[in-house]
């Protein structure tokens, strides 16, 4: 029986429809292809493509990374291969078409009446020279202008007429009319207007695409972070293999200065790793055995051996790419407004162009009427309007990722600028979520280190979180621990041990009450004050004498103080929600200067607090860990989830903080305000330009001798688009 040989195939984690027989890079996003099983390919949702760049295809709506145009839905019957055979148009294609059209336009203009009238120049005459403008203009039309007609066809097929429809209508009308006059009728042709119009439109697209190049897709930027190969240790020997062949469980060697190829855990080695691409934190992070590392981050001076834990679509970087892709596919309210405006502007252009043609046909000759109509159609092209919002949104999404937070929904980023109050979950957000030494109190002044030494020595045999915090504090202060004998745990109360032949008790107030140990009044009052603040107090007793106490608490982050101050400077109130007792909540809120707090709140009741604040007509941002805070994150006007370093697949939040740093919330709000400002500026320019330009193109000031030729209209249209693109890119230079 014949054996069916099935070789290994490779696919893209982000684009499962990409399948090939050998490793390589995804042609869509640039990610390394990963091995795939012989499962049938996943049927994806409707695909979208660019009218100008049919090779650009993605699963959701968005903007073209080549030219910034809005992507249009692909008809279901069209396959990717059918689109690809049209060839991918790039910046260089427009450049080539422009120069060819420009050179051919020169003789067309020289043989036109305008050159003879303005320059007093008479072009050489020869047999058939009357047909030279027609021949050259035809070449320009079919070689340089056909790209616009083909793109218009795609727009109309998608039932989304726009810029390409107007350009195609304008140049087709001018060409057909002029060709008719050349062979059949009498009158003035529009060949020089047609040639210069197409040439200027090609120049405009070339320059605009160059301007937009700096705002390439965030997905492409992220995909460049991974190396193509990894050095895997197999049977004690290091072997370089394609990244696509690395498997979970492999041991990878990362040399100094190298990129970490996969998510994993350090097995051997010490080094500092630059994780700025993941967290936005520029300071390298020290890594030792047992620490997690993230694919795409850069190793420092040491060598690391890493156990691979995640590959492909499970990695942190792939999760980030999914979120960025979701953000690019989502739309803000302003973008929806600009999309509608661009659509209606197209309709207005056709209507005004038709009225202009009819009006001038009654008042002047046919050629002049067509010239005015063409000028209206060209100058009304909604490219600047269509580009105004998506380009700013794309740049802001990329900027957010570089600053340590991920925008999952653009509406979420838009909502940030209108916030009235930020509601923090206390544990793990404002505090570290782990015990730390708040204060060491000694009965005798100066004995604080002695108190800590006895406590840490006794606790060195315990695995309790309080014990670990005490030992850690002693290590920080470089206190040498004593030998412990006869260690005994007293459930719910503390511990008992012998240190230097002395009986030592360390534990709660209940423990010393059971031991009938007396407390000095001053010392006792001091401890009670700390207990009122919700701190856990461990008494230290040596030979039945209390020598001091250690107060422990969930440590407040220094970053939290800065975050609260920054928000208050921006005019935004702060609130805290916690399941802790009133005393604890009051103390933490007081330490941080938070405006209001809510204590003893059960996880399932957190969303009720959000509703309470919203009932006071306040726009609320909720900051939590995305697990038990999910209902509250969803209920809030803006949900901000803590990404905890590698967990970026949080469904309930619109924005995710990759690192647990509340200071980034102020950055979110600042970016939101900057983004909105840029969007408004671009909308104002794009719409204001049309309000002034359309009447001029239609000939409203013709009685004063002011007319816009189609080529001039094309220059103005292209110039307005470039202004919008450049203004959007200025956002990249803003500091958050």
Image (spheres, rainbow, N blue to C red):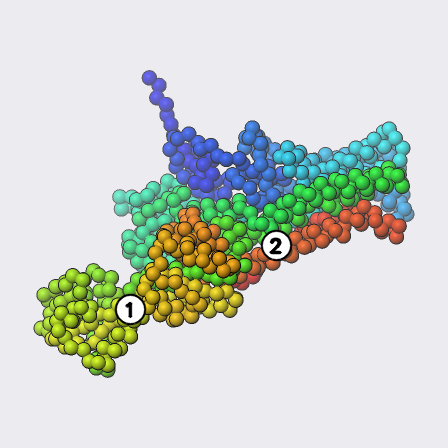
Q: Residue at x 58, y 36 (%)?
A: 73
Within 10 angstroms of label 2, few (less than 14), some, or many (20 or more) residues? Answer: many
Contact between marks 1 and 2 (CB within 8 A): the answer is no
Q: Residue at x 21, y 76 (%)?
A: 548
The quarter in which the N terminus is drawn is: top left
**Viewer-proximal residue, 705 or 630?**
630
Q: Going by the picture, which residue comes out furthest to the top?
A: 1
Q: Position of residue 287 (x, y in %)?
A: 33, 58
Q: CA distance from mark 1 to mark 2?
A: 49 Å
Can residue 192 be seen in this snapshot? no
Q: Position of residue 350 (x, y in %)?
A: 74, 40
**Which type of secondary structure does the marked residue at label 2 adopt?**
helix
Q: Position of residue 98 (x, y in %)?
A: 70, 43
Quadrant of the image occupied by residue 375: top right
Please tell me the numbered disc located at residue 535: 1
Q: Residue at x 50, y 45 (%)?
A: 325
In the image: residue 314, left or right of residue 160? left
Q: Position of residue 628 (x, y in %)?
A: 36, 52
**Viewer-proximal residue, 646 or 180?**
646
């Amino acid at each position: 029986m014949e054996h069916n040989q099935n070789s290994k195939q490779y696919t893209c984690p982000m684009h499962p429809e990409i399948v090939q027989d050998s490793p390589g890079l995804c042609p869509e996003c640039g990610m390394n292809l990963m091995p795939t099983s012989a499962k049938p390919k996943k049927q994806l949702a409707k695909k979208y493509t660019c009218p100008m760049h049919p090779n650009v295809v993605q699963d959701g709506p968005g903007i073209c990374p080549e030219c910034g145009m809005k992507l249009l839905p692909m008809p279901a019957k069209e396959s990717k291969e059918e689109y690809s055979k049209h060839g991918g148009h790039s910046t260089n294609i427009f450049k080539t078409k422009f120069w060819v059209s420009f050179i051919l336009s020169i003789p067309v203009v020289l043989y036109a009446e305008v050159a003879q009238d303005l320059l007093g120049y008479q072009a050489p005459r020869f047999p058939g020279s009357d047909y030279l403008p027609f021949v050259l203009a035809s070449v320009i039309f079919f070689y340089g202008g056909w790209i616009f007609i083909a793109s218009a066809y795609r727009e109309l097929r998608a039932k989304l007429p726009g810029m390409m429809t107007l350009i195609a209508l304008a140049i087709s009308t001018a060409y057909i009319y002029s060709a008719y006059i050349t062979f059949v009728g009498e009158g003035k042709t529009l060949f020089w207007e047609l040639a210069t119009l197409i040439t200027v439109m090609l120049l405009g697209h070339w320059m605009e695409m160059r301007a937009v190049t700096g705002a390439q897709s965030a997905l492409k930027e992220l995909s460049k972070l991974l190396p193509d190969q990894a050095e895997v240790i197999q049977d004690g020997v290091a072997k370089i293999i394609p990244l696509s062949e690395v498997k979970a469980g492999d041991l990878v060697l990362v040399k100094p200065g190298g990129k970490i190829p996969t998510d994993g855990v350090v097995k051997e080695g010490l080094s500092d790793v630059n994780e700025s691409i993941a967290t936005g934190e520029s300071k390298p992070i020290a890594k030792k055995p047992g620490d997690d590392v993230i694919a795409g981050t850069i190793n420092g001076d040491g060598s690391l051996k890493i156990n691979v834990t995640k590959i492909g679509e499970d990695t942190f970087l792939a999760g980030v790419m999914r979120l960025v892709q979701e953000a690019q596919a989502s739309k803000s309210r302003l973008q929806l407004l600009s999309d509608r405006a661009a659509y209606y502007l197209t309709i207005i252009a056709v209507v005004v162009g038709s009225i202009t043609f009819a009006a001038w046909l009654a008042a002047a000759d046919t050629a002049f009427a067509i010239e005015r109509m063409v000028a209206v159609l060209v100058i009304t092209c909604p490219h600047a309007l269509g580009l105004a919002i998506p380009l700013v949104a794309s740049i802001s999404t990329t900027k957010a990722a570089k600053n340590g937070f991920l925008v999952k929904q653009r509406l979420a980023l838009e909502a940030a600028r209108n916030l009235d109050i930020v509601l923090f979950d206390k544990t793990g957000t404002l505090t570290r979520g782990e015990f730390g030494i708040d204060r060491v109190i000694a009965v005798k002044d100066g004995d604080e280190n002695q108190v800590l030494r006895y406590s840490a020595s006794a606790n060195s045999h315990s695995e309790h979180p309080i014990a670990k915090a005490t030992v850690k504090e002693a290590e920080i202060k470089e206190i040498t621990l004593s030998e412990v004998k006869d260690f005994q745990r007293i459930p719910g109360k503390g511990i008992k041990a012998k240190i230097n032949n002395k009986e030592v008790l360390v534990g709660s107030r209940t423990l010393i009450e059971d031991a009938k140990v007396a407390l000095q009044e001053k010392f006792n009052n001091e401890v009670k004050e700390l207990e009122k603040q919700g701190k856990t107090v461990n008494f230290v007793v040596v030979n039945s004498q209390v020598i001091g106490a250690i107060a422990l608490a969930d440590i407040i982050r220094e970053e939290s103080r800065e975050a609260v101050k920054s928000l208050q400077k921006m005019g935004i109130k702060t609130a805290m929600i916690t399941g802790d007792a009133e005393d604890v909540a009051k103390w933490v809120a007081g330490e941080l200067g938070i405006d209001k707090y809510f204590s003893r709140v059960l996880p399932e009741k957190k969303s009720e607090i959000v509703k309470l604040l919203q009932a006071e007509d306040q726009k609320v941002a909720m900051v939590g860990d995305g697990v038990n805070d999910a209902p509250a994150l969803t209920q809030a006007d803006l949900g901000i989830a803590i990404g905890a370093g590698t967990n970026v697949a949080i469904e309930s939040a619109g924005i995710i903080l990759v690192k647990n740093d509340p200071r980034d919330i102020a950055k979110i709000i600042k970016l939101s305000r900057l983004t909105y400002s840029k969007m408004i500026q671009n909308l104002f320019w794009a719409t204001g330009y049309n309000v002034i330009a359309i009447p001029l193109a239609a000939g409203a000031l013709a009685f004063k001798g002011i007319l816009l030729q189609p080529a001039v209209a094309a220059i103005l249209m292209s110039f307005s688009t470039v202004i919008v693109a450049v203004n959007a890119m200025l956002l990249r230079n803003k500091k958050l």
